[in-house]
Amino acid sequence: MGEWMEKWSRQHEQRRTQLLGMIERRAQAFERNGPAARLERRGLPFLEWCRTYLPHYFDAPFAPFHSAMAEAAGEPGMPTFIGAFRGAGKSVMLALARPLYRTLNDTVPYFAYGSQVQKLAAQNMDYVRLELTHNARILADYGPLEVRGPQTCWTLSGARDQSTKFEAFGIGMSPRGRRHGEHRPWEFVGDDLEDAELTRNPERVRNLWDWLMDEVLPAMEPERFVFTVLGTMFGHDCMLQRGRKLAARRDAAGRPLAKLFLQPVTQEGRSVWPERFNDDALWRVRETIGLRNWLRNYALEPEDPTRPFQSRWIAGYRPEELNLAMLDIVAFLDPAVSQSSSGCPRALVCVGADRRTGARYVLDAWIERGSATETIEKLFELAERRRPRVIGIESNGGYALIKPLLSSWEERRGRRLPVRYVNHTRAKSLRIEALCPQFENGRWRFPHNPSAGIRTLQEQFLSYPDGFVDGPDAAAGCDELLPDTFRPGPRTVSYRGEGQRHDFAAL
């Protein structure tokens, strides 16, 4: 173990042995090893650099969100909180590859790593150390390198004119007064800072946040510091949620006090990284771990008791056991105008109400940023498959584009759809929140094996009023098309209004 203080845990030793074998097999020296080739490789953009020097970690093609996630980190003087779904590679990219890249290509004098306990932070730093001491590609292009020091505090020299210090801290350990030469800690990487057990203890949650804000941040190099915290959505008061609140605040110049980046595993019901997680595999995961765990780990939505819609209210049904003859089937289209990547999607929802009990069964949902032509195609497909009694279309927004196109299609096909144009006079928030008592009473039911659109609809309900609300708005439109005899009694519970809209789903 040389200069190291003590032995690693058995689990980490096994992981080290495994990694060393992978490095030896897959990170062998390059055949082209002249000065020009080395200079070219060292100058690669970050993601290409990762694939070139760390092929044992980065074997699947990158998805577009990886570029956005990498760009989110690294803004000087801006505390940054990054959350991504399980398996997205956030720790490998931002706690291993990025510090390596920065250390070897830039002048970063002092990295501070943070975790729940110092030993965990030291283990995360050890993955960086293994690459610096055993990766033949790095050693050939950047060597000779020298790493000296124990597990919790070591220095790298040889890559640049100035050495770089890596030091590990656990929650409660103060980095105040620490120096490497004339430098305070320059970059902080926080990973594995909280888990489900910690977030169930309000005092420990406060202690973690106070440590980050009162001890770590003030100890760093003023204005030039880079502060990156990686997290998971554990609850309504977890670290990412606190980061969200801090990012919503502004200083006197109007600059945000923090940055938040969240990357759920699906967008509009489909995988954001299909090369690694196809839609069928994600559905199996969701069914296995349950909706509540799915929301936290993959959709990045906390279980928040203040939200109008709760996951435990999502009742299920088996489509094969449903008696369609007993249902009054209606559909509703929210024809959003925008087709941009960050604009509101269009939403078409179909619901069947049991004539005996009034229970609402969600039969279909299509929530996408499709073109007007695609929207009309979906309307005709739905009308043929479900034969709704009436299809409501909101007569504002994209209505002016949809109406003449629908008329043209009806003439060409020789078939009129049972369309009713609806002019809503009540606020969208009131229409949606009127469904809350029905959800709480288990009157809204979703298929056990939902389509991508229905999964998106569920997640929009559970994240309401944040994010996009076009699916819930279309569902509320369906409810308004049903006879009054199908409705429950008057509302007895008041809910939080929609308030200011935060389109975090666009991130």
Image (tube, rainbow, N blue to C red):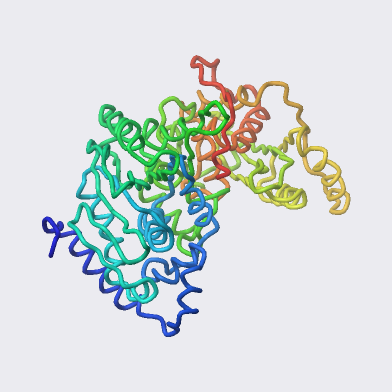
Q: Position of residue 217 (x, y in %)?
A: 36, 37
Indicate the quadrant containing the N terminus: top left, top right, bottom left or bottom right. bottom left
Which residue ends up furthest to the bottom in the rendered image?
31
For residue 361, above or below residue 4? above
Q: Position of residue 261 (x, y in %)?
A: 49, 44
- Say left or right for 416 vs 82: right
Q: Position of residue 280 (x, y in %)?
A: 47, 59
Closer to the camera in the image, 378 or 398 = 398
Indicate the quadrant containing the C terminus: top left, top right, bottom left or bottom right. top right
Count of picture labels: 0
Q: Position of residue 288 (x, y in %)?
A: 36, 51
- Is residue 300 something one can see in this rendering? yes
Closer to the camera in the image, 152 or 16 = 152
Which residue ends up furthest to the left in the rendered image?
6
The residue positioned 82% from the left and 38% from the top of the image is: 400
The residue positioned 45% from the left and 55% from the top of the image is: 282
The residue positioned 54% from the left and 30% from the top of the image is: 465
Report which quarter residue 424 is drawn in.
Answer: top right
Report which quarter residue 363 is drawn in.
Answer: top right
The residue positioned 28% from the left and 27% from the top of the image is: 202
Closer to the camera in the image, 361 or 401 = 401
- Is residue 1 something one can see in this rendering? no
For residue 42, above or below residue 356? below
Closer to the camera in the image, 109 or 431 = 109
